[in-house]
Amino acid sequence: MKEEDRLQERPPIEDFLRMDRIPHIWCPGCGIGTVVTSFAEALKKSELDLDKVAILSGIGCTGRVAGYVKLDSIHTTHGRALPVATGLKLANPELKVVVFSGDGDIAGIGGNHFIHAARRNMDILIICVNNFNYAMTGGQVAATTPIDANASTAPYGNFEYPFSLPYLAEASGATYVARWTALHLRRVTKSIQEALGKRGFSFIEVITPCVTLYARRNRLGDGLNLLKYYYEKSEIQHGADTRTLDISYQGKLIVGKFVDKEKPTFLDCMNEHLGKVLGDKYQPYGVYHDGD
Amino acid sequence: MKKVKADPKGVLTGSHYLDGDYAIAEGALAAGCQFFAGYPITPSTETAERFSERIPTIGGVFIQMEDELASIAALIGAAWGGKKAMTVTSGPGFSLMMENIGLACMLETPLVIANVQRGGPSTGLPTLTGQQDMMQVKWGSHGDYEIIALSPDSPQECFDLTIEAFNLSEMYRVPVFVMTDECVGHMHEKVVIPPAEEIELVERKWYTGPKSKYLPFKPDKDMIPFMVKAGDGYHFHITGLTHDERGYPVINAECQDVCVRHLNDKIRTKADEIIRFEEDKTDDADVVVISYGITSRVTTRAVRKAREAGLKVGTIRLITVWPFPEKRIKELAKKIKAFIVPEINYGQVVIEVERCAAGQAPAIPVSHCGGWVHDPDDIFKAIKEAAQ
Ligand SMILES: Cc1ncc(C[n+]2csc(CCOP(=O)(O)OP(=O)(O)O)c2C)c(N)n1
Ligand code: SF4
Ligand SMILES: [Mg+2]
């Protein structure tokens, strides 16, 4: 085979992964890998300069994503990827900054950072893998575990109200909000691609099976069964009111793109406001023009 | 190590009447700090206020974060985004920062944290002074690591040592702490800010080799790895997990040994170059008073009185508290009767003095639990008793 042919046949994802770190740590059948594939596909389609894209993760199974993606990548501490991302974005505003992490990381321990980054409309894309539990530590109950679902620290089933992440994101100020399941590969890819092309706080939730813990403990079959189940139970409702997106145990999953609007970002607001108040004395910060 | 002159944009050259908190902000601006993330807490808030007022006309970012966990996290991001970054806090906020101080050490990230100490534990004495975080700054995050901590005794030193803190953090790729206290933080004194061309800054140790060869944690000859910033095409990976030179996680005891030894030894083996203290009249001293920060100013009065009374007393004023001047303490311990260690806590740095003196001379604490500076007479009495 000629070298170009071989290159052409090479799966695109290899260009985006640290192949020297493969095999990865995820269980066979885990859905995280498919979301990473969608991300890589979206990056490729977006035609962004990969030198200017940075990815950050917190801690967890999903938190390992930053370690496998061949971009400037920071594996931070549990819950803190977003504030690290905030510092990174503000220090180098020409970066496209992506936070890729788990539901526990983003909405549990990192929940405060989540609502505040959204409130500020920080120009960051969050891809949140929601597997309804704290997987890395062995399947404990999370802020997203549906009522009645079993978890290692909710052995009689969960009785706490879970967060609806799209609702939380929109209420906090996000300008792009979508939810898919990991089986909606093309849709996830499209959403990520769209969000990469936007400025502002974007949030994409991907419901993803954790075969080893959540599925096994709740006797939901293997990864494929579970994915199919999520897929069949999901109903696409673009523009749905985010107040109606609660997830009940093995119930209907409303997916789609719920929010897509424009709003000045933190840096836009800072430059605008301080420029207005301070006039010529103000030193505009981080203003980049395409093609400069 | 590449030295450059300060950019005049941030330097408020002249003679000013400033409190310590403001002087810290001016030191940061003079050092070229363009990123400040913080959360209000007495008695440190004035530093954040000053920075937020000054930075818009200099060029940079001030952001008030949602809490101190976020502040320190944002500093780490900002440093890897290529900026010099700092925050300021006090006891409760300092406690919240601990986990990510560990991350900053693990990622060998240059950044500066000022702690305007107040009385603790817990909410303690928000408006009153303390020096009670002196052990926490060294040991507060989990695992073995080394940091550098400086202790200014005046607003002028708040300015000078904040610049020094930035320089040290760049030189050693390590978080550096300006451990002041409420008293110095709120004390107004003359602060002379020199012209920019008289302020020497250490430039970040930027990597310039081939892109594919960059290793974020490969020690250079001076043990300090080169740094890059996100967005320059290096596609680096850094992680708080135990990692190799590439920044890749390696979860075993061998890699842990190399990684953690490096974090510690890059400071320990350079301690002599880092350590700064002022020593006075120790040649024939019977007693040596070791103090730092505001307490060293109170000590001056006590020592003057003791000398007037004919007592042979010397002093050491710590400018760097960590790393600690272990060698000098050891030498002195052999020839003096006792060390006196006044500090505004219930006995912290005195434990380190005792350890270094290793039984050759006692280390006598003059402790109290915070809220006020010492009565010089308490220090005088301790000197007198020890000298006899
Ligand atoms: C401060 C802190 N607390 C607890 C942990 C332990 N821990 C590691 S991962 C994790 C949960 C991760 O859950 P999630 O973010 O949902 O990721 P998943 O593993 O499910 O992908 C926890 C609690 C930690 N690393 N740090
Ligand atoms: S434990 Fe669950 S989330 Fe983690 S890798 Fe395995 S299947 Fe995936
Ligand atoms: Mg999870």
Image (cartoon, grey):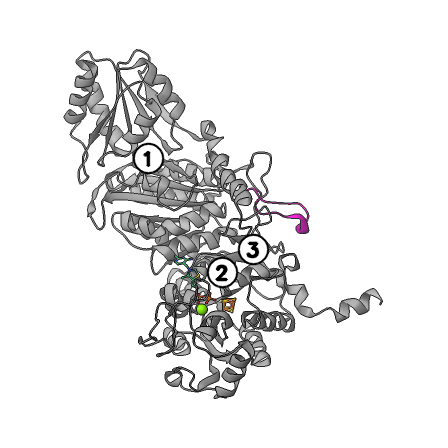
- The chain identifier of the residue carrying mark 1 reads B
Marks 1 and 3 belong to one chain: yes
Left or right: B196 as drawn, with respect to B131: right
Report which quarter residue B329 is drawn in.
top left
Q: Is mark 3 on a helix, strand or loop?
A: loop
Amino acid of disc 2: Lys
Residue depicted at x 20% and y 20%:
B383
Foreground label between 1 and 3: 3
Amino acid of disc 3: Ala
Q: What element carries label 1?
A: loop
Q: Name the residue under label 1.
A: B152
- The chain identifier of the residue carrying mark 2 reads A
Mark 2: few, some, or many residues within 10 Å (few <14, many ≥20)?
A: many
Q: What element carries label 2?
A: helix
Marks 3 and 2 belong to one chain: no
Please provide the residue range marked out in magenta: B204-217
- The chain identifier of the residue carrying mark 3 reads B
Q: Position of residue A245 (x, y in %)?
A: 40, 83
Amino acid of disc 1: Pro
Most frequent secondary structure within the magenta stretch: loop
Q: Name the residue under label 3.
A: B230
